[in-house]
Amino acid sequence: MSGSDLRKATLRCEQCGGDALSEAASPASMESFRCRKCGHAFWVHVQHMAAPHDLGVVTYKAYVAADSLKAARWNRLHVPKVFGGRSNFHLSDMEAQCAKGLSKWDLGYYSENEVKELQAAAQEIGLLVEFVRSS
């Protein structure tokens, strides 16, 4: 079934038995998460969107500069060491920006707590990351 067919699909309402339509506004997937502390694994339905919805949570957009070939090569090796494993970091997105020759790479949105951790990890290896408040 294609994505457009899925959006038209109906399911039976668990509460009243009526027809229920999908309300997905953007592509979504079921993703497996694992707790870094205890190892517990669980599934979460994730809505993929270009920008975060305003939930009153402060978020920051992360960028790295790749204004020279040397900087781009260095960043390609070191950005995944800092951002790898984060749900908002997608290596393929970074690689696409690198292939386009962009001088500034968008690494996604992160919470205040994540920014603190990412800044410490980046500083440890000498990676310069710019975090711009987005909400």
Image (tube, rainbow, N blue to C red):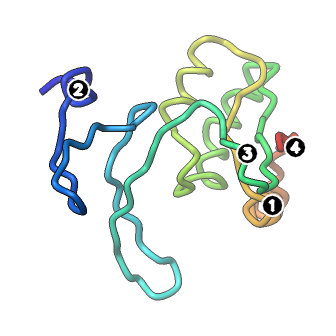
The CA span between labels 1 and 2 is 38 Å
Q: Which residue is mark 4?
A: 133
- Disc marking residue 112: 1
**Position in image of residue 76 (x %, y %):** 62, 35
**Position in image of residue 84 (x %, y %):** 56, 53
The CA span between labels 3 and 4 is 13 Å
Split into 4 quadrants, where in the image is the N terminus? top left
In terms of image quadrants, where is residue 125?
A: bottom right
- The amino acid type of the residue labelled 3 equals Asp
Residue farthest to the top, as pictured: 100
Q: Nearer the viewer, residue 47 or 70?
A: 47
**Position in image of residue 66 (x %, y %):** 77, 25
Q: Secondary structure at mark 2?
A: helix
The CA span between labels 2 and 3 is 27 Å
- The amino acid type of the residue labelled 1 equals Glu
The CA span between labels 3 and 1 is 15 Å
- Mark 3 and mark 4 lie on one chain; the one further toward the N terminus is 3
Residue drawn at point x = 25 percent, y = 20 percent: 4
- Disc marking residue 8: 2
- Mark 2 and mark 3 lie on one chain; the one further toward the N terminus is 2
Residue drawn at point x = 15 percent, y = 49 percent: 12
Q: Secondary structure at mark 3?
A: loop
The CA span between labels 2 and 4 is 37 Å
- The amino acid type of the residue labelled 4 equals Arg
Q: Secondary structure at mark 4?
A: strand
- Mark 4 and mark 1 lie on one chain; the one further toward the N terminus is 1
The CA span between labels 4 and 1 is 9 Å
Report crowding for label 4: few under 14, some 14 to 19, many 20 or more residues within 10 A (C-alpha). Answer: some
